[in-house]
Amino acid sequence: QVQLQESGPGLVKPSQTLALACTVSGGSITTRHHAWSWIRQSPGKALEWMGVIGNDDRIWFNPSLKSRTSISRDTSKNQFSLELSSVTPEDTALYYCARTEVNIDGNPLYRFVSWGQGTQVTVSS
């Protein structure tokens, strides 16, 4: 059973860069059958998909966040990571990593089959 676990600081100051990691166990992030997403939920708002990294390191971003978002993976650690720059209090949210279905071409289908438990990030001075 594939499990995901987010990690990172719970408090980030405005204008700094938020950095989170997702460690995957029970499966490899190099699989061609899935991609790996970051999703967040701010208080009182709907889930917001942020971006996804595929098996060949192709990355798709939410256009509204693309200019501030970086996603990468470390296959030696079976981890993938998120960086969000120039954060503001509006970036305060529960951040999730998720295993994502892909089609035969490796493109994400935005169906999330496994989720981490989420990690709370607060942006405050």
Image: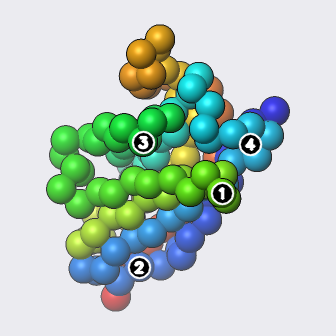
Q: Earlier in the sequence, mark 1 or mark 2?
A: 2
Q: CA distance from mark 2 to mark 4?
A: 26 Å
Q: Earlier in the sequence, mark 4 or mark 3?
A: 4
Q: What residue lies at 40% left-to-right and 71% top-to-bottom?
A: 18
* Residue wearing tag 2: 12
Residue 61 in which image quadrant: top left
Q: Amino acid at mark 1?
A: Ser
Secondary element under disc 3, as helix, strand or loop, is loop
* Residue wearing tag 3: 57
Secondary element under disc 1, as helix, strand or loop, is loop
* Residue wearing tag 4: 3
Q: Earlier in the sequence, mark 2 or mark 3?
A: 2
Secondary element under disc 4, as helix, strand or loop, is strand
Q: Amino acid at mark 2?
A: Val
Residue 114 in which image quadrant: top right
Q: Assign the C terminus to one quadrant of the image.
A: bottom left
Secondary element under disc 2, as helix, strand or loop, is strand
Percent position (x, y) of residue 52?
A: 41, 40
Residue 57 in sight from this viewpoint: yes
Q: Amino acid at mark 4?
A: Gln
Q: CA distance from mark 1 to mark 4?
A: 17 Å
Residue 48 in sight from this viewpoint: no
Q: Earlier in the sequence, mark 1 or mark 4?
A: 4
Given this view, does label 1 or label 4 mark the residue nearer the observer? 1
CB within 8 Å, label 1 to label 4: no
* Residue wearing tag 1: 76
Q: CA distance from mark 1 to mark 2?
A: 27 Å
Examine the rendered structure and indicate whether residue 5 appears above or below residue 48. Answer: below
